Image (tube, rainbow, N blue to C red):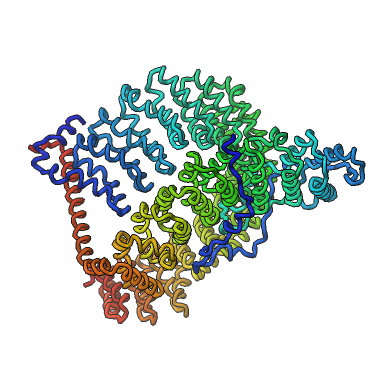
Amino acid sequence: MSAYSTERILPVQAMSSAATAPPSVDKVDGFSRKSVRKAKQKRAQSSSQFRSQDKPIELVQLPLLKDVSAQEQPELFLKKLQQCCTLFDFMDTLSDLKMKEYKRSTLNELVDYVTVSRGYLTEQTYPEVVKMVSCNIFRTLPPSDSNEFDPEEDEPTLEASWPHLQLVYEFFIRFLESQEFQPSIAKKYIDQKFVLQLLELFDSEDPRERDCLKTVLHRIYGKFLGLRAFIRKQINNIFLGFVYETEHFNGVAELLEILGSIINGFALPLKAEHKQFLVKVLLPLHSARSLSLFHAQLAYCIVQFLEKDPTLTEPVIRGLLKFWPKTCSQKEVMFLGELEEILDVIEPTQFVKIQEPLFKQISRCVSSPHFQVAERALYYWNNEYIMSLIEENSSVILPIMFASLYRISKEHWNPAISALIYNVLKAFMEMNSALFDDLAATYKSDRQREKKKEKEREDLWRKLEELELRRGIQNSDGIIPT
Amino acid sequence: ARLRAEVLNCPSMAGADGDDSLYPIAVLIDELRNEDVQLRLNSIKKLSTIALALGVERTRTELLPFLTDTIYDEDEVLLALAEQLGNFTMLVGGPEYVHCLLPPLESLATVEETVVRDKAVESLRKISHEHSPVDLEVHFEPLVKRLASGDWFTSRTSACGLFSVCYPRVSSTVKAEIRQHFRNLCSDDTPMVRRAAASKLGEFAKVLELEYVKSDIISLFTALASDEQDSVRLLAVEACVSIATLLPQEDLETLVMPTLRQAAEDKSWRVRYMVADKFSELQKAVGPEITKNDLVPAFQNLLKDCEAEVRAAAANKVKEFCENLPEDSRETIIMTHILPCVKELVSDTNQHVKSALASVIMGLSTILGKDNTIEHLLPLFLAQLKDECPEVRLNIISNLDCVNEVIGIRQLSQSLLPAIVELAEDAKWRVRLAIIEYMPLLAGQLGVEFFDEKLNSLCMAWLVDHVYAIREAATCNLTKLVEKFGAEWAQNTIVPKVLGMANDPNYLHRMTTLFCINALSEACGQEITTKHMLPVVLKMSNDQVANVRFNVAKSLQKIGPVLDSNCLQTEVKPVLEKLAADQDIDVKYFAQEAISVLALA
């Protein structure tokens, strides 16, 4: 346990400005998007909270807490908590209107009460608070309205019972943040099972709910040291299921945001468990189809890791190269952006280890027919720190990059790209003119050599296939040659 | 196999071909290592060729170790490799050497990417059958154990798929070990592994001895069915079908039903959805008595579920469920228990529920017979034909044939017509397309008079639809109608209208004339084609739009075989020759093609 207590975690808000900056390249293609076409659709609401509605619900109106004496308050508080366990059907907008309003005002009162009152938190309050919160928030999330909900395209379905749910979340957060709150008592009720159900709720389509959950989980992680390892493990499972099984989970960005603050607090040297999390969970998240929805938060986590331990640079970059998008140009631009963030903090000794495979990929990006990809890659040459690294290692990088640059400088359809390439070539020429001249001189013969090699390959395979054919015939005829 | 292995290894032969010197492994391995992923992928896909060139021994001693060591590649390459190795038995020297393939496949079965892993497991399952019982225990089963106790969840997940293939052919001690491993994985810490185990539970139960099904499988089944994660619980429902099939009837009530009842009322809609989705299988597996007592009320609840998703899945099963009810009480159950729910679903708030119901509801008429259909079902059909959602109406119309057999379609025709007309003019072209496809069926059932009177004008209107796919389908529809109603009918009702469009100011409509002629000439026969269609086609060769002209050439090529040779020589040939000298390159091309196909040169 002591290892965890050295962990400090940042407040979520402190890093959210860095993590939630909108991805700049998100929606720039010329095709009309579903979201545009469907703009007029009204926001769908859904709720799976309420099962049967037989008869109207009656709650006995209780006096206000401020209207009773201090001695009576604790008992009244408990009674009010119990009343708030009653659930209402919000899909039926006409039923129980009066009682819905009563519960809403009671919840509001409870929020105020936990914020300002002192001495209300007796031991017997804890189970009642947790019970009330559990009753209200834990539920099976309803099926998504559209058959294949695409978070990038479709409007989220909003939780119909939000008028109550929001207050319950607010109450719970105030409760957790209260000065009188004692984790040592609460841990009996806020246990692994509670956390597991809480994590499942992150799949909610309603962004307002996920935002509340983020704060709740962050507070719990901060206050319950005994739950930290469990929370991390369950988040791992959610991410692995998301990447390898369902490709569907709405709360990835929010969980990553919390992780960003968790990683920031990891003690050094990093434990094997944390490194495994980076390599086996965070890196594969890059392969998700919906990467754009959480890429900012993901890149933030990755850079946090590298700032903690620069020796992780090589596995991280190799991982990115492994998951490099094959067909999706938008994702490729995101990868290039993340890579630049990594290169901004890379140590020169690490750079040398990874430069060859890295620049082979960059050379492919530079010659991408998609001008945004090529442009994003070529922008690296505007980054002074990256330029200095390239310059130090020009004898390795220039030969890798030269052929692509040289070819594309003449062929690229987009004049802006040609101009950028020209500048890069010029920069290389100034960096290492002798090598540059050599490469230019041998460019043609190198191409010819490649072509010759290509032809040899084809010959080899042709001969192999002839052999296969011949043996196939022998086998089918059963004739053994002498 | 032995003989062939020796032949391939025969030094004199290798010498004669010079194979060994021609294809040193280094060269081949270079290919497998090529920097370009695509080339690497190509090489892996031709791995059998490489193995053949190397011969069985060098494949075993050089190629396979290389593959085992260098397994860190792109997932796409690994997937191809995993697939190849499943077919490699002969290339390593036949069944007695098949265990050589295990090391590389074992590594592949631990890879993160699911498709690669699944493919590796598939190949392992395949080659498991080629192992002798001894090899299975010496080589294969230890591999399964290693995977089952691996550190990372991927290997344990893969192990789940391998128990059932080796269990039947190993000794009883090993069997006990396998059962123990399976038990462990069912209560694994990681939900991914529990899901994998749950999804293989039914398959594993099938190969177990009945006593162990009762002792082991049932407790695992019960545990998985009450797992904390609904994604695990719903997989147990699938297993329920296999398990129930294996057990004798008298044990079902105590061993399976408590769990099944609980699943049908699970708090997660996903689990209830699964029960609804598997309802017919469950019904068959538990037999008629339990169906009557338990499944009927459960089915009613699912049809009334609070989640539309579940109701839709249940609605889909209405016909199958009713069909499989025991005959003695079928009608009573349907009339008293199922039909009331069905009636409510007809006016459900969710369109997916209604359209799921509409796709099966007509099937009930054969089960219930004429009188019940007229009294109880017909009002429902008519209500659905007027539904606001086009998919619901379409599903009713597409299943008209079931009703036709029982009560005849005439009962419906009053409501049918407005429904068809409305669908025919729906704003969504896919809806229009769908209704066109049912036209021949409707025409057959409604008869020629009704058709001429009410539907013919619709069919002609589609020919000038602004969406090409509709015009194309409309053309095809005409052909089918002519096949149904005959050439004379065509000549009187369709041909004049089609030919009239040849003078339309819109060139797209003029082209439709040509497309219709292409489609109709064969069904209409030589006389109509020569007398009525050909003159119009020939006249259109003077059209000012090149697209029309080259379609004239294409049409002539198409209808040529229907015409007699005299007509071809005197009428068609001159026009094609003229078109072959057209200034438009495409017109020339198609005219020349027609000339050569019709042998008019």
Figure quadrant of residue B284: top right
Please determine whether, in this image, residue B183 is positioned above or below residue B490: above
Residue closest to the eye, B146 or B120: B146
Please determine whether, in this image, residue A481 is positioned above or below residue A421: above
Q: Position of residue A437 (x, y in %)?
A: 25, 69
Number of marks in picture: 0
Q: Position of residue B339 (x, y in %)?
A: 67, 41
Q: Position of residue B178 (x, y in %)?
A: 44, 24
Residue closest to the eye, A461 or B33: B33
Please determine whether, in this image, residue B37 is positioned above or below residue A269: below
Name the residue: 77% across, 41% down. Answer: A180
Figure quadrant of residue A446: bottom left
Is any part of residue B276 visible from this angle? no
Q: Position of residue A60 (x, y in %)?
A: 88, 41
**Image quadrant containing the C terminus of chain B:** bottom left
Residue closest to the eye, A86 or B497: A86
| Left or right of residue B12: residue A46 | right
**Image quadrant containing the N terminus of chain B:** top left
Is any part of residue B248 visible from this angle? yes
| Left or right of residue A29: residue A466 | left
